[in-house]
Image: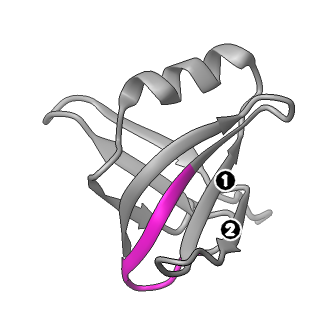
Amino acid sequence: MARFQVRETFAIQDQPTFVLAGFVVEGEVWPGMEVGILFNTKIRIKAKIDRVEFVRRPDGDVVCLCFDCSAPDEVTLWEALSVRNQTIEIRPATLPLTTYPK
């Protein structure tokens, strides 16, 4: 498991992509991992990271976790979640169960 401090969030409307920008606090992150945001004991939202990009800024390098959204409404939902200034968990994606022939 990795932990990520979200510094800011933004949407890239023409793709549509949503970005969590910040810093890896613990572990490593890579495409295909899942971001888990816990709102309370019953509500947890998961999303797969499609790509990880690095941005050099005068105040330090920033890691960008990018999510390709299947619909514009999904971008709106991410914006409404307001995860800025939170530390979130990142885990390897759950592998599907495989049925082997006998």
Q: Is residue 64 left or right of residue 1?
A: right
Q: Quadrant of the N terminus?
A: bottom left
Q: Count of labels shown?
A: 2
| Residue 38 locus on image (x, y percent) | 26, 42
Query: Dot 1: few (<14), some (14–19), or many (≥20) neighbours within 10 Å?
Result: many
User: Does residue 19 lie above or below 39 as drawn?
Assistant: below
- Name the residue nearer the viewer: 42 or 37: 37
Magenta residues (range): 20-29
Report the residue marked by disc 2. Answer: 52
Relative depth, front residue between 58 and 21: 58
For this orientation, the residue located farthest to the right is 14
**Snapshot quadrant of residue 61:** bottom right
- Residue sitting at the far bottom: 27
Which residue lies under the disc numbered 1?
A: 66
Check the image and report above or below for 86 versus 29.
above
Indicate the quadrant where residue 90 lies. bottom left
- Specify whether residue 96 is in view: no
Label pair 1/2, CB-CB below 8 angstroms: yes
Look at the image and say whether residue 23 sits in the magenta stretch.
Answer: yes
